Image (cartoon, rainbow, N blue to C red):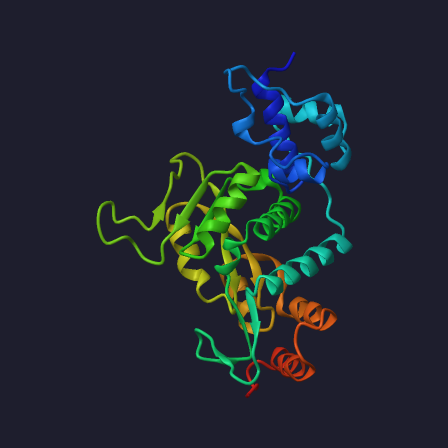
Amino acid sequence: MFTHTQIWLGIDRLASSNGYSPSGLAKKAGLDPTSFNKSKRINPDGKPRWPSTESLSKVLAVTDSNMSDFFSLIDDGKMRVKKISKDDRKNIAHDTAKILLDTKSVLFNASKPFTLKSGRSSPVYIDGRRLISFPEQRSQIMDFSAAVLAQEIGVSKFDLIAGGETAGIPYAALIAERLQKPMLYVRKEPKGHGRMAQIEGHLPDKGKKRVVLVEDLQTDGGSKKTFVSALRKAGTKVEHGFVIFHYGIFKESEKNMKKLGIKLHALATWHDVLEVARQGKYFDKTTLKSVESFLDNPEGWSP
């Protein structure tokens, strides 16, 4: 006989193991998105509210699970991760690119190029912080993120998620919630007062903890060194990094990750955005051609 707490824990773990939040799983199953909200697990009179057998049946069906799978989640907490095929991965990249375009989190402007942090001129620009203001699209991106990390690394193969200051912090928090992992965040330099801490959150003293570093995007990967060094100095093991968006056009990115001993995981690149922008006719042909020219040769591109 399972308790009220165990049944809801099973639903939370079923959602996480398939890359969903509880509300995302409810929506996927055709239920009211608020059905599994924690605020609804206790009735107004204080009595526990149990999920119906019908709703449980529906979430098992959409996750291709059975009751035995569900009970195993309750018994030992093992997370049976839904396998992501190559087609699934391509669809994730496509949908991520479309969301970034629709929320204007990526911009194209060939006539008035942007100046990147590196000093390069670019006809493309991504605002990784803008996405957090769009709840529905943000939730979809976070579902993708949790599923990719669960598939490509394995939920049992890392202990904490760390967000890099500042844009990585909200994404790390949202992913940690979905995967039910402790979260840290890392400053670019130690705080100038109090504990003089560079890493915020609780880092257990015992055992070498495995950490996934999360940021919003990566250009050439140069900025990752600060965060990775701080985490390793604190005694953690950092072998994986995750970003929503990877430029995917600078050779230094791969070299820098190799030097750091980091495997980078990302949802989409500029090539995915260009493909979706062309298919959806988001921009005129001249702009698209200029952007393609930049992506093919970012170092030699000029307006």
The percent coordinates of residue 262 (x first, y second) are 53, 57
The percent coordinates of residue 243 (x first, y second) are 55, 57
Q: Residue at x 64, y 62 (%)?
A: 97
Does residue 238 sit above or below 128 in this rendering? above
Q: Could you tell whether 82 is left or right of 246 in the image?
A: right
Question: Which of the 4 image quadrants contains residue 83?
Answer: top right
Which image quadrant: the C terminus? bottom right
Q: Residue at x 52, y 39 (%)?
A: 177
Residue placed farthest to the front in the image?
Answer: 44
Residue placed farthest to the top in the image?
Answer: 1
Q: Could you tell whether 195 is left or right of 160 in the image?
A: left
Question: Which of the 4 image quadrants contains residue 146?
Answer: top right
Residue nearest the observer in this picture, 61 or 90: 61
Number of marks in picture: 0
Does residue 205 sit above or below 213 in this rendering? above
Does residue 227 sit above or below 18 in this rendering? below
Which image quadrant: the N terminus? top right
The percent coordinates of residue 247 (x first, y second) are 57, 68
The percent coordinates of residue 264 (x first, y second) are 57, 58
Q: Residue at x 62, y 79 (%)?
A: 291
Does residue 13 sit above or below 125 in this rendering? above
Q: Could you tell whether 196 is left or right of 217 in the image?
A: left
Residue nearest the observer in this picture, 180 or 155: 180
Q: Residue at x 51, y 20 (%)?
A: 44
